[in-house]
Image (cartoon, rainbow, N blue to C red):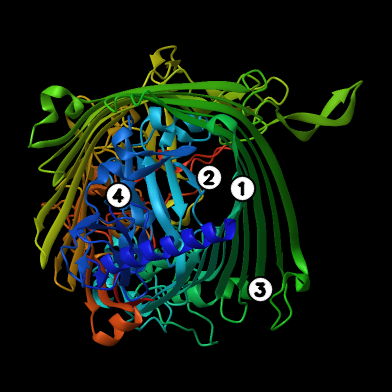
């Protein structure tokens, strides 16, 4: 009986299934994106059910549906679309990218949030243009795209030059760079990362956003970078390859042979002498700039593979770049690999790893140095045209003052470096009861650098006297970071959204350095083991640790009242032993006014939110072991006898040293209207950095000499500013669209509160700190060009106000403090000459598409900044035997001459006994510029074969630095000779934030033209 009943049930079920199947119909079609290319991986769902299908690699789909149903087409990053079947058997669909950015997810410290829930000042940066232009350094991706963020490329050297990122001005005299966090690992820079592997960038600009990173350097902001990850579905391959050329943007006008000889006659005549006789072979007519600079090639290749399943995903990125420099003999090569894996082991356990490695090698030349110190750029300007390339012995010919010619600097000196960078992490995430997630991540950052240099004794006259000069430097930085976090989130009564994160972080960094030097090499041997004389070895090791505890709470009520608060406690061995711990609280809130009842039905306002935040962040001392004094061997008398001992040396210990603290407020609002077609964000900020660290000089009784130590001064650095960002989808047609974003940032930087000191007469005067020292003409005495002083921006130029030329004597005139003019200025006549910090920074990005054609361009600009063109001191100082610019053709030559260029005086001391190269406004120039930073034209190639095979092909052409409008007389206004080195001459050193905007023979910037192809399948 049971068997009969079972058989009857099966027959009835089968009959019902047949009847239902007869009522269902099959629908098929093709799904394309906004460019008309097939879109694989789109989910096609029967509305109200879980029945679904997925489009294949050709965008094709098939699904069986009941009558009178609706299909929902959805894909990440695109607006969902609904289609009523209505008896149709074929439905073709085109999806458009999502433009409602409020639901987009933004990466924040130790987590993420929807953009609509952000309460702080965070900017997200588009990375889509990376595949359309040669981007070598990650910082280039940020340029012009975010308000309050200035990307400063100090050099045109291959390998990305020396880029610096400034967020909301300069907050500290101890460094300018923000904190970089790549896939959760805190790093010093982004050298380990290929920009083509970046998925997203978030910039945390205010203290309430960056505070969760505490004292790690968040004083200057935080840049969060997430690399590309794999996605579920078929394996996807992306290939980008390009080739192009670079050329110098402009060359400078110099004297020819006759004009140079006339200049030499004047220099010596004005000191009552005749010009000395020159070597008989000084009869050339060389254009050294043409011999030094070239049109240089550049090429790159990137391959990305990604895919995955329900259990795991993968992404593999491979890259190679080969860039020759515009200075002969310079080049840069880099090979990179990036691997990201994510695997779901259990429903409660996910593990993964992110690994990025690259190896770079290149050949450099010396720049930012005088011709007398081997600086190639200045040597190309300084070396007279009459100097031949070689002398009679086949060696490179030196100038009459023994300064080397630029080809000698390039080819006699082999400076080769290799960098290995490894960044990686392994992580595990465990889902615990009560919706708690535990994540543990262990990350490492390893940077290894080797530089070998050799000066050839067969071609260089100086090296020939010692049979060659060789050196080798090796250093390694190893940092590990171990983070452990707990995340918990819940929704109560559909009104209260709560998210909590708490965690710990441990950082340890070790640094080692070794330097070898020697002379006396056998012919043909360049390795240091062959050196036979003047051998020198030095080694150096440091390490430090940071232990941190942090937490954050985010709360939202009805999605309109938002609150966030965080706290971080940091302890570090880098601070004094009496101040090892610091605490950094933040709080911020927002009110989404558009969610209120009185605006709910408003058709014009799509979203309106006002924000406010306050927080504290810190900056660790740049030096280590600050609690302890250095000691040097010294002798002392005891019992009438000399005994060996130790005496205090630089630096002196300070157990009370603590980190700099920045307190800041931020007020802002976000407004989007016309269904999110137009959006505006505005922020006002004010931040103040206190306890900033400076080297203070003391006379110690034991050593009897001046020693320096790091101390917290009572002064402060203040930054106040306004940021605006406006984005509009100006045209949104099917065939034609135009989206544009303009941003503007205004910042006022000032130093105040530094205590006064007593001068030699017992009077109170402002305490000043001088930086930016340059030894002009290769002399051993440095002239400081910048200053830190109350009432001035950080690192302001300081010197004399140039007032023209005395027609009677040809001597330079300067303004006095009392308002007059003099040819013999006093020290008290010095004044501020402006700042290298811009008062305003602008960016304007555009994307215009017409069918398959796309035009993208970026315009950026800065205003209000000055440049100290120290190169002109060498080319217009007229005090040595080098060549000069054509500006000196207007120099004073006879009594009564009316001109703005003083007399040429060999030796640099005029008839009034004053130096002819005093730091003055004569060499200060307007550094403002407007630049077409990048211009890219691309075309999506379409044909039936590509569509059938699921291939997307795009060709593009790009130009960078195509047009620059500026009044600057040098090679390029975006320049900084001291962007990464210590220039103070003090033991503790001076970071670049105190010596900016100085041009002294810096590697010139380039125009870049490239053509490339993107292929994906």
Q: In the image, which is nearer the foreground, mark 3 or mark 2?
A: 2
Left or right of residue 136: residue 100: left
Left or right of residue 546: residue 257: left
Q: Does residue 304 sit above or below 197 in this rendering?
A: below
Q: Secondary structure at mark 4?
A: loop
Q: Nearer the viewer, residue 41 or 747?
A: 41
Q: In the image, which is nearer the foreground, mark 1 or mark 2?
A: 1
Mark 3 vs mark 2, CA separation in Å: 47 Å
Q: Secondary structure at mark 1?
A: strand
Q: Nearer the viewer, residue 676 or 545?
A: 676
Disc on res. 184: 2
Disc 4 crowd rating (10 Å Cα; few below 14, some 14-19, many 20+) is few
Instruction: Count the labels in the image.
Output: 4
Residue drawn at x 59%, y 47% is 347
Identify residue for label 4.
48
Image quarter of residue 361? bottom right
Mark 3 vs mark 1, CA separation in Å: 51 Å
Identify residue for label 3.
468
Left or right of residue 285: residue 418: right
């Amino acid at each position: 009986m049971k068997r009969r009943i079972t058989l009857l049930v099966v027959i009835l079920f089968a009959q019902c299934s047949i009847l239902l199947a007869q009522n269902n119909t099959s629908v098929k079609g093709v799904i394309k994106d906004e460019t008309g290319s097939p879109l694989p991986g789109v989910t096609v769902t029967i509305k109200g059910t879980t029945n679904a299908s997925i489009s294949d690699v050709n965008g094709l789909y098939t699904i069986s549906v009941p009558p009178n149903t609706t299909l929902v087409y959805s894909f990440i990053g695109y607006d969902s679309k609904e289609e009523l079947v209505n008896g149709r058997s074929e439905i073709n669909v085109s999806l458009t990218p999502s433009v409602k950015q409020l639901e987009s997810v933004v990466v924040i410290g130790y987590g993420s949030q929807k953009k609509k829930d952000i309460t702080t000042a965070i900017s997200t940066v588009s990375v889509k243009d990376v595949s359309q232009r040669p981007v070598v350094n990650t910082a280039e991706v940020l340029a012009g795209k975010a308000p309050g963020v200035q990307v400063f490329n100090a050099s045109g050297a291959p390998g990305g030059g020396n880029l610096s990122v400034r967020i909301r001005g300069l907050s500290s005299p101890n460094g300018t760079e923000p904190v970089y966090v790549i896939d959760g690992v805190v790093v010093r820079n982004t050298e380990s990362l290929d920009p083509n592997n970046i998925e997203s960038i978030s910039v945390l600009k205010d203290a309430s956003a960056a505070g969760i990173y505490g004292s790690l350097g968040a004083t200057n902001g935080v840049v969060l970078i997430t690399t590309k990850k794999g996605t579920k579905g078929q394996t996807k391959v992306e290939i980008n390859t390009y080739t192009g050329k670079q050329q110098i943007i402009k060359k400078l006008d110099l004297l020819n042979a006759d004009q140079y000889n006339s200049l030499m006659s004047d220099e010596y005549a004005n000191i009552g002498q005749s010009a000395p006789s020159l070597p008989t072979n000084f009869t050339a007519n060389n254009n050294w700039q043409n011999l030094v600079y070239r049109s240089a090639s550049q090429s790159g290749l990137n391959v990305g593979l990604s895919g995955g399943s329900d259990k795991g995903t993968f992404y593999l990125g491979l890259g190679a770049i080969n860039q020759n420099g515009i200075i002969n003999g310079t080049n840069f090569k880099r090979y990179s690999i990036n691997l990201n894996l994510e695997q779901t082991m259990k429903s409660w356990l996910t593990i993964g790893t992110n690994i990025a490695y690259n190896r770079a090698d290149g050949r450099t030349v010396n720049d930012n140095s005088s011709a007398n110190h081997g600086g190639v750029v200045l040597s190309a300007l300084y070396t007279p045209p009459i100097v031949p390339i070689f002398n009679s012995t086949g060696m490179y010919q030196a100038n009459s003052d023994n300064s080397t010619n630029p080809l000698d600097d390039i080819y006699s000196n082999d400076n080769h470096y290799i960098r290995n960078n490894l960044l990686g992490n392994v992580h595990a995430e465990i889902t615990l009861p009560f919706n708690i997630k535990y994540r543990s991540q262990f990350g490492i950052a390893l940077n290894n650098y080797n530089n070998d240099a050799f000066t050839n004794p067969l071609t260089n006259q100086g090296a020939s006297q010692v049979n060659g000069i060789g050196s080798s430097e090796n250093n390694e930085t190893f940092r590990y970071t171990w983070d452990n976090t707990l995340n918990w989130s819940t929704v109560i009564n559909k009104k209260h959204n709560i998210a909590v994160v708490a965690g710990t972080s441990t950082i340890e960094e070790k640094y080692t350095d070794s330097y070898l030097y020697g002379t006396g090499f056998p012919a043909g041997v360049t390795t240091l083991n062959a050196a036979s004389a003047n051998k020198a070895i030095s080694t150096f090791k440091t390490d430090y640790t940071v232990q941190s505890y942090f937490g954050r709470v985010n709360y939202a009520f009805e999605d309109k009242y938002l609150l966030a608060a965080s706290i971080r406690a940091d302890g570090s061995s880098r601070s004094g032993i009496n101040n090892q711990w610091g605490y950094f609280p933040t709080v911020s809130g927002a009110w989404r006014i558009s969610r209120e009842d009185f605006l709910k039905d408003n058709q014009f306002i799509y979203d309106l939110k006002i924000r406010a935040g306050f927080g504290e962040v810190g900056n660790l001392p740049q030096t280590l072991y600050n609690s302890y004094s250095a000691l040097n061997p010294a002798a002392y008398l005891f019992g009438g006898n000399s005994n060996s001992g130790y005496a205090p040396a630089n630096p002196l210990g300070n157990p009370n040293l603590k980190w700099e603290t920045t307190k800041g407020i931020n007020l802002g609002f976000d407004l989007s209207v016309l269904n999110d077609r137009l959006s505006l964000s505005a922020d006002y900020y004010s931040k103040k950095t206190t306890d900033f660290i400076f080297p203070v000089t003391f006379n110690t009784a034991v050593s009897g000499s001046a020693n320096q130590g790091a101390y917290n001064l009572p002064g402060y650095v203040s930054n106040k500013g306004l940021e605006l960002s406006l984005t509009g989808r100006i045209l949104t047609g099917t065939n034609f669209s135009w989206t544009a974003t303009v941003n503007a940032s205004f910042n006022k930087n000032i130093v105040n509160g530094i205590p006064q000191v007593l001068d030699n007469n017992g009077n109170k005067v402002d305490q000043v700190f001088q930086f930016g020292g340059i030894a002009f003409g290769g002399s051993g005495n440095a002239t400081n060009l910048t200053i830190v002083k109350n009432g001035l921006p950080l690192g302001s130029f300081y010197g004399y106000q140039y007032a023209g030329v005395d027609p009677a004597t040809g001597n330079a005139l300067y303004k006095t403090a009392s308002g007059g003019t003099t040819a013999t200025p006093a020290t008290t006549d010095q004044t501020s000459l402006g700042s290298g910090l811009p008062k305003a920074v602008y960016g304007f990005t555009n994307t215009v598409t017409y069918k398959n054609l796309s035009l993208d361009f970026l315009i950026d600009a800065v205003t209000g900044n000055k440049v100290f063109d120290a190169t002109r001191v060498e080319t217009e100082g007229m005090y040595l035997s080098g060549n000069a610019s054509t500006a000196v053709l207007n120099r004073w030559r006879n009594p009564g001459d009316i001109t703005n260029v003083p007399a040429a005086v060999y030796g640099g001391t005029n008839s009034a006994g004053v130096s002819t190269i005093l730091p003055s406004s004569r060499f200060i120039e307007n550094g403002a510029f407007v630049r077409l930073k990048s211009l890219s034209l691309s075309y999506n190639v379409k044909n039936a074969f590509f569509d059938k095979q699921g291939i997307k092909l795009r060709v593009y052409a790009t130009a960078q630095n195509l047009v620059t409008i500026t009044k600057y007389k040098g090679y390029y206004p975006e320049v900084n000779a001291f962007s990464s080195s210590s220039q103070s001459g003090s033991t503790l050193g001076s970071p670049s934030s105190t010596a900016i905007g100085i041009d002294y023979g810096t590697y010139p910037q380039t125009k870049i033209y490239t053509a490339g192809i993107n292929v994906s399948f």
